[in-house]
Structure formats: C-alpha cells, structure tokens
Amino acid sequence: MIASKTLLGGLMLVALGLGAGVASAKTCDVSIEGNDAMKFNLDRIALAADCTEVQLTLKHTGKLPAAAMGHNWVLTETSAFQPVATAGTAAGAAAGYLPKDDARVIASTKLIGGGESTSVRFPTSKLKKGGDYTFFCSFPGHWTVMKGKLTFG
C-alpha cells in the first residue's frame, strides 16, 4: 500500500511537470506584408527568447497575380540564403520557387498573389539563440531585394 501511494505520488509529480511544460508554450504572432513594388514592410523580425513557436502571416497588399508578382516568405540560415534562392529559381513555378524537401529551409509559406494571405507555423526549436537568419521571397529576382534579418533570443 505504501509503495503504491509513493508510485502514485511520483506519477502525479511527473504529470504536473508535463503540464507545466505545456502551460509555458508561447506562440508568437508575426505579420508581414509584400507589395507590387517588390518590398516587404519589415526588414527585421525579432523573436523573444520565450517564444516556443511562431505563427507568421504573409499578406500580399498588391493587385498583381502570383504568376506576375508572387510572394512567399522563406526562412534559412543566412549562409544558405543565396544557394536556396538559386535552387528555388531552378525548381520553377510549379514548385513555388523552392527546392523540394530542402533541409536548409527552416520555414516557408506558399506563393501568393495580390490580395491574398497565407501563414506558416514553426517551432523555435529549429532556431539557435543568437543565430544568423535571413527571410526572403524566393520568386525569381525578388530575393535580391525582398529580404531581411530574423533574430531569436
């Protein structure tokens, strides 16, 4: 009887500990806009150290369709930014100008046109505090000007 009470008490502590981990989860919402002038409205995104996941929403504020002026939001380590962008151009429109299943892509949205919006949710466990990250639009030619820095922590 004493052993079973001790076991039950231990299981309750474990359950409480697991519940505390869930309670401390924090989703950080980020909104960013892209327009027909090939510009994001942000060139920096700073994520707080207590964010456990990110819910990023991209809104295309322009009027042109995705085939002419499509935008997406892609996040990579800065060292992978240009190679991923180049590979995205080679992947073509059908692939959303992103290389398929590329491990260098931390997070990305689909390609959208004027008046549309899309979102992506990703865990910050994919990021290192103080890491060097670049976000960009992978549409051909856009990534040279539609880019910014993301910081975490």
Image (cartoon, rainbow, N blue to C red):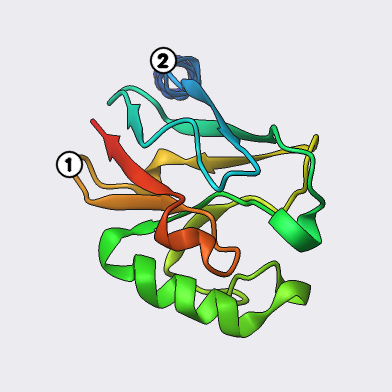
For this orientation, the residue located farthest to the left is 130
> Is 89 located above or below residue 42 in the figure?
below
Whole-percent x, y for residue 83 in the image: 39, 77
Whole-percent x, y for residue 31 in the image: 56, 26
Query: Is 42 in front, or is 96?
Result: 42
Query: Is 129 in front, or is 13?
Result: 129
Q: Amino acid at mark 2?
A: Ile
Residue identified by numbered label 2: 2
On the question of residue 11 being in view, the answer is no
> Is 19 located above or below residue 55 in the figure?
above
Count of numbered circles in the view: 2
* Image quadrant where residue 42 sits: top left
Question: Upstream in the sequence, badge 1 or badge 2?
Answer: 2
Quadrant of the frame with the C terminus = top left
Label 1's element?
loop
Residue identified by numbered label 1: 130
* Image quadrant where residue 82 sits: bottom left
Whole-percent x, y for residue 105 in the image: 47, 63
> Is 120 located above or below residue 18 in the figure?
below
